[in-house]
Image: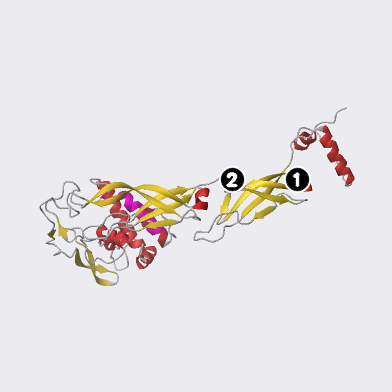
């Protein structure tokens, strides 16, 4: 990855938050992981690149060091910081991302978390709903029972690392000589090697499967909310546990309403007569028709608050409000009789109106005087 900008590798900006960096890595890792792309060398190289980038940018100290010095320029003392990147194998990074803990037993790794997107409508936000989701996960191979070894055989302890899964080396840095630990290149951090791989899973112990699940979406959710379904992600290796499924929610746009939290906004057309004289009217709410009063003298843009006709809060409680914005309807054409009535009204107020000319808006509004 020499010469590449680590932020560009993950597709994030240089001021990206830790959560944004982690989310970008999770998305790319699922896309390019070797188990999802068997035999694809380009995908494997891409996975190594994004894993190396994540190893630096997910660590606050390493990220600060990278931001100050960069990985393509030598440090003072003549040591290239790319040496640090070579100490990260994708086995360690896979553990950091999917397992989240130390490598006490590299052969028994927790399964990866999976993510699926679900779209819901406003009516479903109001009541809550159930959604069936389909997604791909890594499932334990039934032929070898997850060992990765051909039936009748079993994995052997790695001779290079004696089963530790890692090797130790000394590197020269700008701070002096440092001892670092990296995944064993012979067993890729597993601690064991497989002489006769399982023909079904090619020695991985896991295979890709598509599965479905019904998830319960509670009322009051918003776009960006995520549901966690424990134990429904990918299977682990050995005795490692199963990962989790994360359901990312998006609320579908509704042309009738705008939304701010639990508050809904809608527009109601009000005639000139209704605005001036007042009236009783109604508006379509999210789940029912709601009546309300228009007081005399209502102006364009006036907001009516209809309490309790908005959306519920995510964790329960009373519903928010429905805000109705008045939009005064101005007629684009009047009969002579209607125009005369308006002129008489204007005259009673002492207004002097000049007869409009041309075919513009005002001219079209009043029409032409006959006779």
Image location (x, y in percent) of residue 334: 78, 35
Query: Given the current orientation, which residue lies at the most extreme left position?
Result: 152
For mark 1, give the secondary structure: helix
Quadrant position of residue 103: bottom left
Above or below residue 339? Residue 296 is below
Find out whether residue 33 is within the magenta segment. yes
Q: Which residue is painted at 41% across and 60% down in the image?
A: 19
Q: Quadrant of the C terminus?
A: top right
Q: Which residue is mark 2?
A: 256
Q: Residues within 10 Å of mark 1 (few under 14, many from 20)?
A: some
Image location (x, y in percent) of residue 231: 32, 57
97 or 358: nearer the viewer:
97
Q: Which residue is painted at 29% across and 72% down in the image?
A: 175
Above or below residue 278? Residue 157 is below
Region of the chain picked out in magenta, as a range: 20-35
Q: Is residue 302 visible?
A: yes
Query: Given the current orientation, which residue lies at the most extreme top position?
Result: 371
Q: Which residue is mark 1?
A: 274
Q: Is residue 5 visible?
A: no
Query: Given the current orientation, which residue lies at the most extreme bottom position?
Result: 176
């Amino acid at each position: 990855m020499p010469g590449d900008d680590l932020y560009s590798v993950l597709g994030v900006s240089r001021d990206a938050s830790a959560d944004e960096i982690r989310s970008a890595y999770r998305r790319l890792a699922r896309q390019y992981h070797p188990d999802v792309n068997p035999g694809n060398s380009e995908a494997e190289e891409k996975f190594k690149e994004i894993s190396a980038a994540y190893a630096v940018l997910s660590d606050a100290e390493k990220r600060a060091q990278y931001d100050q010095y960069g990985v393509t320029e030598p440090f003072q003392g003549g040591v290239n910081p790319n040496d640090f990147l070579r100490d990260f194998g994708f086995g360690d990074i896979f553990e950091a991302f999917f397992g989240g803990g130390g490598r006490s037993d590299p052969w028994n790794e927790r399964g990866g978390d999976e993510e699926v997107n679900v779209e819901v409508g406003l009516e479903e936000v109001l009541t809550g709903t159930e959604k069936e989701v389909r997604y791909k996960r890594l499932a334990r191979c039934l032929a070898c029972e997850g060992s990765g070894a051909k039936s009748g055989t079993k994995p052997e302890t790695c001779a290079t690392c004696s089963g530790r899964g890692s090797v130790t080396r000394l590197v020269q840095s700008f701070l002096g000589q440092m001892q670092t630990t990296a995944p064993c290149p012979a067993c890729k951090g597993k601690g064991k090697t497989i002489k006769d791989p399982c023909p079904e899973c090619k020695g991985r112990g896991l295979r890709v499967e598509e599965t479905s699940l019904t998830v319960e979406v509670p009322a009051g959710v918003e776009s960006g909310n995520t549901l966690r379904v424990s134990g429904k992600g990918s299977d682990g290796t050995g005795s490692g546990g199963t990962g989790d499924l994360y359901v990312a929610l998006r609320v579908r746009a509704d042309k009738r309403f705008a939304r701010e939290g639990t508050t809904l906004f809608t527009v109601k057309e009000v005639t000139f007569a209704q605005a001036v004289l007042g009236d009783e009217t109604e508006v379509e709410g999210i789940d029912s028709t709601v009546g309300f009063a228009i007081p005399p003298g209502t102006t364009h843009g006036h907001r009516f608050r209809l309490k309790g006709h908005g959306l519920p809060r995510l964790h329960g409680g009373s519903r928010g409000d429905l805000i109705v914005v008045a939009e005064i309807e101005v007629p684009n054409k009047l009969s002579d009789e209607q125009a005369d009535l308006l002129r008489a009204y204007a005259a009673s107020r002492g207004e002097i109106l000049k007869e409009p000319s041309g075919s513009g808006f005002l001219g079209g509004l009043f029409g032409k005087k006959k006779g």
